[in-house]
Image (cartoon, rainbow, N blue to C red):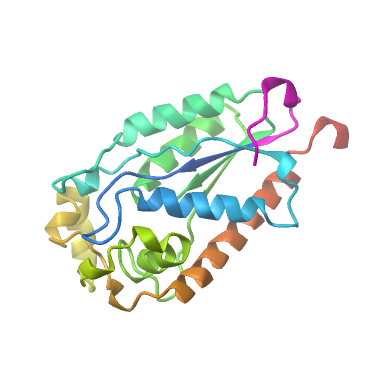
Amino acid sequence: MTIPTARDITVSERIVILPLGSWEQHGPHLPLHTDTVIVDAVVDAALRDTTLSATSFLRAPTLPITASDEHEGFAGGLSSGTEALVATVVAIARSASWARGVCIVNGHGGNIPALAKISSALEYENIPAHIWSLPSYSGGDMHAGHTETSLLLHIAPELVRQDLIEVGATQISADDMDLMKVSGVKAVSPNGVLGDPRQAHPDHGREVLALYTSSLVRALQTCITRWSTPASQ
């Protein structure tokens, strides 16, 4: 999508898409901005879908640093923390008073606690908003494993250090989840990988991207239906 000028925007005409990425460790083989690469690819693919009118949307810049405190202890990561992310996203949505609504497209699992607070705040302020996150699927893993490595092998294979791929923690129990909430990912997986990326393949990445894209397209179609323009009311 080309970036419009202010004069190109008609009040209550467009829906803002606000993607959320992250800047955090993704094991020894994937880059720090992995979540941003993935969520950008999903948004771009959704906006190319022929069932949507791209002119119904304004794609905001992706927020590249979000709530990643759970990756503390690994070099390179940056985090806004949950409360700062909540304040930022609510303020951005509030500032989009000219829009039909805001669709927040989340590409990072660590943002889920913030998204619950964001949803509550936007509902309280009567700001039209919808929150979508990457859906789970049978056989998918959590972090820097088969799923994300396959996605990057499809989307941007030049970013994958295939010579450094190694297995991480593959059996994540409820106790492990509780431990990660308190002590972070490193307490469960010293290399930062939650899954097994060794058999990752671009064909699987293509399939997962298609799954994510179709899910987001449905969400955007729902937003169009829910937030009608003045001309259609």
Residue in view at x 38 percent, y 33 percent: 85
Q: Residue 69 placed where, x, y %?
A: 24, 42
Q: Nearer the viewer, residue 26 or 219?
A: 26
* Residue 98: quarter of image: top right
Q: Is residue 3 magenta?
A: yes
> Residue 127: image x %, image y %?
60, 30
- Which of the 4 image quarters holds residue 93? top right
Q: Is residue 138 visible?
A: yes
Q: Answer whether residue 13 is magenta in the image.
A: yes
Decide if residue 226 is in sight here.
Answer: no
233 shown above or below 41: above
What residue appears at the point 35 percent right and 58 percent down from the top-left corner? Answer: 159
Q: Quadrant of the N terminus?
A: top right
In the image, residue 208 sits, relative to residue 51, either above or below, namely below
Q: Is residue 167 left or right of residue 205?
A: left
Magenta span of residues: 1-15
The percent coordinates of residue 161 (x first, y second) are 27, 63
Residue at image location 73% in from the left, 20% down from the top: 7
- Say which quarter of the image contains residue 136: bottom left
- Say which of 90 and 75 sits in front: 75
